[in-house]
Image (spheres, helix red, strand yellow):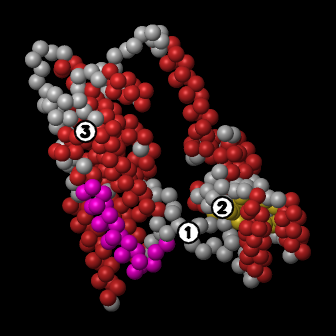
Amino acid sequence: MNLQAQIELITAPQDFTRLCNAVLQAEYGTDFLPIDDDRADRGNDGYLKSEKRMFAAHCFKRIQNKGLDGEIRSKMMGDLKKAITLRDQGDWDITRWTFLCNYPIPEGIAAEVHAFGTRAGIDVSWCGPGYFAEVLQRVTSVRELFPNLMGNDILKKLDEISQIIESLSRPPDDVQILVDWVPRDAEEQRALISQAPPAWEYLLFASALKLGKERLEPKWRDFQTGYGRRNGMYHDESSSIQRLVDAFSDVEGVVERMVMVFSARIQEEAFGPPGVRGNSDSILHLAGRVVAGYEEILDWASEIRGEVYPESTKNAAKLAAQMAERPAQDVRDFIDRVFLEISKLPDLLKLPNPRVKLSLELTVTVDDAAVLAFTKEVRKIRRKRRF
């Protein structure tokens, strides 16, 4: 998928706004004035001083199709009328107006909007996905801010390289390799289940945990940086307090459900009693519940960070999200410990009279200091509201 097609598929308004601001600042420097999109902007998404040009930016929250012509017209005409009002009120000196979008503008709508602007004494123009793709390809500093948009081409090349390397190291088809290590992908997992070497159940469990953790590394990196994609939820002071208090119960529930699946009965169903073959489906399900719980914790913090709060409760929201740090780290540590211990199993079992003791106990804790800080902040807000 080329870069222009990727830009057309953006459906998060905050992501598109960030792209618009980065491109325009690269093109015009300090001559361009970006406008905070978290507040009512009256149709003003940026202003170019030297050209007296106002920008209005928009992307739809779903994939574009031909049925959106009416909405496109409504959005363009609505924002252009807002610009005319701002000019007539003397708030902004506007002689030019540019509509920024990640979808094509139909010819009939283009002609109507251009004519409307001409009658109002404003030069109308628009920039679509082709414009943003060209700037991203031309300006390295902007391109580096949006690695996801360039990722498909890179991943395709990496996949081609990986296939070449794999073909050079792959054994002949008539030679079957005994998998007696922690599988690195689904194909090796299937081979392990089929061959069933000693302790295969534990090797499969470690593999499922490790692959699940690796799949969620992008979310973990966002979690570490405190990033949360805007989700369209806005709160006043009252609703934000209730939201955050309820959220604390939510994360407790996630932890309780995740630890619950490690009962002795469930472990025996998965790994089997001594001398009895385990159940591969139950093993993968057990590992999947751990990974799913870990993902729930990351998503929980992201949702908190992606909602918009009034100034008085922003710190409480920040502290609420921080309560997820200890549980998330506990799960990561558990997965790493299980992988490390089980990776040693094949070599240990080759020793005479091997003695192996495995601990698959998952302990997830809550940071008392983080909970206390959050609780104090909520109490402080509530006290202020009484006065």
Residue range highlighted in magenta: 234-257
- Evaluate if marks 2 and 3 touch, with contact meaning CB atoms under 8 Å apart: no
Q: Which residue is mark 2?
A: 60
Q: Which amino acid, mark 3?
A: Ala
Viewer-side residue, 200 vs 182: 200
Q: Which amino acid, mark 1?
A: Asp
Residue occupying the point 69% across, 72% down: 43
Q: Position of residue 115 (x, y in %)?
A: 89, 69
Local SS, label 1: loop
Residue occupying the point 16% across, 34% down: 273
* Residue 173 position (above or below residue 22): above
Question: Mostly what secondary structure, the magenta segment?
Answer: helix
Q: Position of residue 74 (x, y in %)?
A: 75, 71
Q: Which amino acid, mark 2?
A: Phe
Which of the 4 image quadrants contains residue 128? Answer: bottom right
Q: Which residue is mark 1?
A: 38
Q: Which residue is mark 3?
A: 270
* Residue 33 position (above or below residue 346): below
Indicate which disc, 1 or 3, sits on the residue closer to the N terminus: 1
Asked whether 216 falls inside the magenta stretch, the response is no
User: Which label was assigned to residue 52?
Assistant: none
Q: Position of residue 197 (x, y in %)?
A: 27, 21
* Label 1, label 2: how far apart the Cα atoms are: 17 Å
* Label 1, label 3: how far apart the Cα atoms are: 49 Å
Indicate which disc, 1 or 2, sits on the residue closer to the N terminus: 1
Q: Nearer the viewer, mark 2 or mark 3?
A: 3
Determine if residue 347 is in view: yes
> Dividing the image into 4 quarters, which one contains the N terminus?
top right
Is residue 326 found left or right of 296 in the rendered image?
left
Is residue 320 found left or right of 17 in the rendered image?
left
* Label 2, label 3: how far apart the Cα atoms are: 46 Å
* Residue 6 position (above or below residue 89): above
